[in-house]
Image (tube, rainbow, N blue to C red):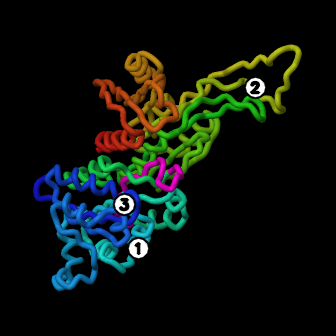
Amino acid sequence: MSQRRVLLIVGGGVAAYKALELVRLLRKADIAVSPILTEAGAQFVTPLSLAALAEEKVHAELFNLTDEAEMGHIQLSRSADLVVVAPATADLMAKAAHGLAGDLASTTLLATDKPVLMAPAMNVRMWLHPATQRNLATLRADGVSFVGPDNGAMACGEFGPGRMAEPEAIFAAILAALEGGALRPLAGKHVLITAGPTVEALDPVRVLTNRSSGKQGYAIAAAAAAAGARVTLVSGPTALATPPGVVRVDVESAEQMLAACRAALPADAAVCVAAVADWRPDEVFGVKLKKSHDGPPLVRLVENPDILATLSAHGPGRPKLVVGFAAETNDLEVHARAKLKRKGCDWIVANDVAQDGIMGGDENEVLLVYPQGTEAWPKASKTEVARRLAARIAEDLG
């Protein structure tokens, strides 16, 4: 990685403190860092801290007499191998999307001919605002790549998408870009993802369902979209926001989910993360069932369609790669390998949901099982597991 250089633009947000750790990781990898600190960014981190870690001068002013005598903003924008914006605030994204150039950061972004990677960070309402989502779509169309944002607690006290990705995740994305220029390794690919629980009606008010939160499936959808894929997310009922750039199809039952998956084909890869109910009531009562002296009603269950096995079946339209998930409570690898054979899919991602904090939590520890072997992935955030899986899918699809 010697001689590689990153131009790091630090925007104004509480997450700016993470930029200091990012600089430390880059310098440890012998990657040179040229910092630009916005006026707002300087309210959160000092030029002295940034300069000390980067071991280089911090640039802040567009109309600096010494720098601009040499057309400094042009030199900055062209001298690096990659431009990174972390945190990428709503303001910086808006300026970049509309080609504004009122300060050194925005002028440099407009003048650069190098790849740009942004790590957004803002309040959840700002991130979900239609204006920010329009700017995001514009920037993606212009070739800008993104890492994050993550779901999580924010300094404002709210929770949701908008939290800046961790420095390690941004660093990994930078390495991928510098080593192979592969910021969007899934560009041109269509990835079908199922997520969340299914809901099987018993009567107008009662259902059979499960504890799936949908977090892992949504994280995979976000990671695949960030890697450049066209993503169709078929989702059971969840409280999660649709990841940026993802087409979401809402369903309830297993039969609806299968129909939506078939309608989304063809796809290059299918990742079946949803916790699909194995059974559904044979009869859906038209009115709410009441208590009676005869005791509870007898409910007969019938088997639901097997979505993973259906997508894995060989024939025209089968995705090149089909990945299933297995939530187990014991004998993880044994059950996962049996499921791999039974379903006919290419990989199984297995996790032990008996562990505290896995089902519905923000972390996961998985075992990737495929015909030739297994890979044990250490416990990490579901976002990081998703990024790692998206990278493996991109590698497999070539």
**Circle nearer the viewer, 2 or 3:** 3
Q: Residue at x 17, y 85 (%)?
A: 69
Answer above or below: position of 275 versus 57.
Answer: above
| Label of residue 87 in the image | 3
Q: Which region of the structure is painted magenta? A: 142-160
Q: Position of residue 20 (x, y in %)?
A: 27, 56
| Label of residue 166 in the image | none
Q: Earlier in the sequence, mark 1 or mark 2?
A: 1
Q: Residue at x 40, y 43 (%)?
A: 383
Badge 3: residue crowd in 10 Å (few <14, some 14–19, many ≥20): many
**Circle nearer the viewer, 3 or 1:** 3
Residue 176 in the figure: left or right of residue 96 = left
Question: Disc 2 to disc 3, how far (Cα)?
Answer: 53 Å
**Which quarter of the rendered picture does the C terminus lie within?**
top left
SS label for mark 3: strand
**Circle nearer the viewer, 1 or 2:** 1
Q: Position of residue 334 (x, y in %)?
A: 39, 16
Badge 1: residue crowd in 10 Å (few <14, some 14–19, many ≥20): many
**Residue 181 appears in the rendering:** no
Three-letter amino acid code at disc 1? Lys
Answer above or below: position of 345 versus 301.
Answer: below
Number of numbered markers: 3
| Label of residue 95 in the image | 1
Residue farthest toward the left in the current orientation of the protein: 2
Q: Nearer the viewer, residue 315 or 29?
A: 29
Answer above or below: position of 72 versus 195.
Answer: below
Q: Earlier in the sequence, mark 3 or mark 1?
A: 3
Three-letter amino acid code at disc 3? Pro
Residue 139 in the figure: left or right of residue 26 = right
Question: Disc 3 to disc 1, how far (Cα)?
Answer: 14 Å
SS label for mark 1: helix
